[in-house]
Amino acid sequence: MSKVISIGILGYTHLHVPRFAASIADHHQARLVGIADAGVNVAAARDAAEHHKTRFFDTYGELLDQEDLDAVYLGNEPVFHREAVAMAASRGVHVLCDKPIATTLDDADAIIESARSGGIKLMVSFFPRFQLPLLKVKEALDSGDAGDLVSVYAVKYGRVPTKAVGPQSADWFLDPTLTGGGGFLDIGIHAMDALRWLAGAEPHQVHAHVGTMINADLDVEDFGVATIEFDNGVIAALTAGWANPDGYPTWLDVKFEILTTKQVFLIDKPHHDFTLYTNNGNERQAWLKPDVDNLLTAFIDAIVTGREPPITGQDGRAALAMTLAAYESSHTGNVIDLRQDMASLGMDDA
Amino acid sequence: MPQNRETRIALVGCGSIGVKGHIPAYAGIPNVKLVAVCDAIEHLADAAARLTGTPAYTRLDDLLESVDVDAVDICTPPRTHAAVAIEAMEAGKHVLCEKPIAHSLDDADAMLMAAETNNVRMMIGQVRRFDHRYVALKDQIDAGRVGRPVFIRRAERQLLPFPPDTWFWDPKAGGGVILDIGIHALDLFRWMFGQDPVEIRAVARAVHRSAREAGSFDYAMITCKFSEGGIGFAEASWAHPESFGSGLYASLDVVGTEGKLEYSDRDTNPMLVFGSDTGVTLPRYFTLMSATEHAFEAQIAHFVDSVRESQEFVVDAHDARAALAMALAAQQSANSDHVVIPEITTTGNGATRGSSQTTAAASLEDTRL
C-alpha cells in the first residue's frame, strides 16, 4: 500500500507520546499532521512540534478540523479519553488510543459506541502483542505445534513513573482521578491483554491482592498479584507494579513463563535490551522502537484495508474489566466472577 | 542419650526419598549411624539393607524390639506418618519425619501430642529451610537488605512421572502437587515473612492423565496473604518437561520496600551444551537430587545435633503443622471457587507468635465467594 495516512497527536501527556510522535514522523506510510495539547506537558508538546517540523494546536478541535487529517494517536490522561474519542469519531477521524482505554467500563462502552457510530477504526495500544517472542508463542499455540496451553505467569515491573528523566512531567500518573489507578493498572494492563490474547478465551474468574505496598507515600496502588481463570481452562497469573528499585539494571522487568502440554516458553524482557558499559557505571537500554513501529503499522493497515485493527476497543475494554475485577477482588477478598462483565461486552457475537 | 556414642537411627520407609534423599546423606554426618532399615514392602527393605549394610525389617515393632535405636527417620507415605511416628515415640524414640507432617491436621495434632506425652523430640523435614540457597536469601531479608518484604514469588517446577496408582497423586493420602511441592513454597513464605497466613487462593490444573484420574492436580498457582500484609505467590508443577528439572527447576524473587532479590536455578547452572543432533541442552550438572542433597545432609545433621545437645530445632514441628494447614487450605481452594482461611492454631519458630483460632469448619463458613 502506498497510501500515506495523515496522523495527528491529541494530548502530549503520556510518557509514550514522544515515541509515537517519532514513529509517526518516521513511518513511510504516515505523515505527522500536528500536535494538539493544552495539558500538563504543553511545553514539551510545543518543543516536539518544532522538533518534528509540524504544526502545534492549542485545542483538540483545531487539529481535528484539519481537512487532511485521517487519524489521531490519543495520549492524554485516560479519564479524558472518552471525550476525545467522541470528538474524533464525530468527525470520522480514526483513533489509536493509548492504554488503558478508559478508567471505567461505562466510559469504555461509550468509547466503543462512539467509534461504532462514527464508523471509525479504534485501536488500543498494548505492546506485548507486537513483541516477537510472544508472537512466536501465539503462532505455536494457534498452529497446535505447542499443544494445549496450560498456564501463563506474567511479570510486569517498572519504576514509579515520576522517576523518569525527560521534559514531560509524570506527576499525573500518581493522581487516581486522572488515571483510574496506579502501578498495577498502568503497567499490568499490557499483560492482562496478553494473557487473554494468549489464552484465546474470555476470563472467567479473577482473584487478586492489589495495594500501595512498596511506597506508602503514594495515593495509588503500586503493586498487585492476580490469578485469572479463563473459560477454556487456562490459568494465568500476573504480578505487576512499580516494583523495580533504582539499582535494577533496567527500567522494565517483563517476563512471560508459559506452560503447554508439550513445551515451556521462558521469555525474559521480550522487548530485548543491550548493555552500555562506561567508566561511570553501566546502563541497560531497551529496544522499544520496534514495538511502537509495528503497532503503528497495524493501525495504518487497518485504516488502509478497512479491516478491524488487531487490538479492538473490545480488547481494551476486556483488559480494563480484568483489572477492575482485580481491584474488586482485592477490596472485597472475594473471587470475582467476570462472566457477566464479559457478556455485556457482546463477545459472543464477535 | 549418652553424649559419647553415635546416635543410632533406623530408617523407616525405603522408597525414593528415603533411598535417594536420606540414605546418602548419612555418610557425611559425624556422630550418627544408620543401624536398621524397615519397609512394609520386603524387597524395598532388602534393597535398602544391601545398600546400607544394615538389617532389614518389614515391621517397626520387630525392629524396635531387636535393635537398639535412639531415633527413627520416617520416609513412608504421609498417611502412615502418624501411626509410625506415634509407635516410635511411644517406644521412647525421637523422630525425624518427612514432609508433609501428615495427610490430615488430626494426624498432625496426634503426632505433636505424642511427642509431648512421651517427652521425645520430633522434627519434620521441611528441607528447604536447610538449603543453603534459601538460608542465604532469608539472611538477606532479615538483614533488611530489601527493606520490608512485601511480595515473594516462588516457583518449583519439574516432571515427576510417578506411577499412576501411587499415593503421590492422591490428595487424601497427602499427595498431589499442592501437598507435595506447594507445601515447600508455603513454608518458605511463612518463614521468610515471619508472619502467619490469613488467606489462601489456589487455582490448579490436572495436565497428565494420572492427575485427572486421581482427581488431583499436577500444576497449581497459589496466592497466600499473611498477617502483616505480605503476599506469597507460588507455582508448583509436575507438568513441566523433564529437562526443566535439571537446571531451571526453582526460582524465588522478593520484592521489598527498598529493594528486590532475584534467585533462579538458571543463574547457578553455568553450562550449556550445543550439539548438532540435540540442539541446546542444559547438562545434568545440576540434577534435582544434587540440588537438594546437601540440604538433606544439613537437615539430618541438625536433627541429630539438636537432639544430642537438647537444643531447639530451627524448624519446629508446629511450623510443619502450619505448612500442612496452608497446603490443605490451598488444596481446598483449588477444588472450589473460594478463598480459604488456613487453620493455624499454634505457631512454631517460623512465624510471629500470636495465633488465629480458626477451625476447619469455620474456614469453610468464612469462605467468601
Image (cartoon, coloured by chain):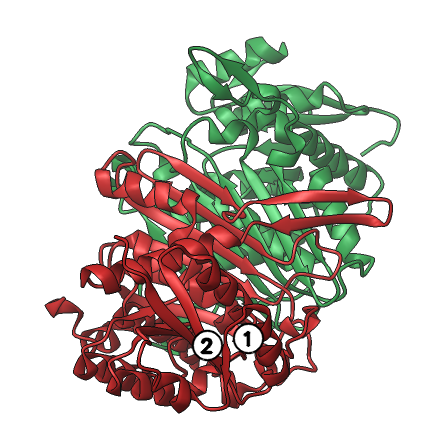
Chain colours: A red, B green
Say which of A177 and A209 sits in front.
A177
Q: Are marks 1 and 2 on the same chain?
A: yes
Location of mark 2 (residue): A34
- Bin the neighbour count of mark 1 within 10 Å (Cα to Cα): few under 14, some 14-19, many 20 and up: many
Label 1: state its secondary structure.
helix
**Mark 1, chain letter?**
A
- Residue located 40% across and 84% down the image: A63
Label 2: state its secondary structure.
strand
Residue B317 lies, in percent from the top left, at 64, 51
Quadrant in the rendering for residue A138: top left
Amino acid identity at mark 1: Ala
Say which of A157 and A107 sits in front.
A107
Residue B45 visible in the picture: yes
Location of mark 1 (residue): A49
Left or right: where does residue A74 sit relative to residue B287?
left
Q: Are marks 1 and 2 in contact (CB under 8 Å)?
A: yes
Amino acid identity at mark 2: Gly
- Residue located 41% across and 36% down the image: B240
Residue B230 lies, in percent from the top left, at 62, 67
Quadrant in the rendering for residue A15: bottom right
**Mark 2, chain letter?**
A
Left or right: where does residue A313 sit relative to residue B357?
left
Quadrant in the rendering for residue A337: bottom left
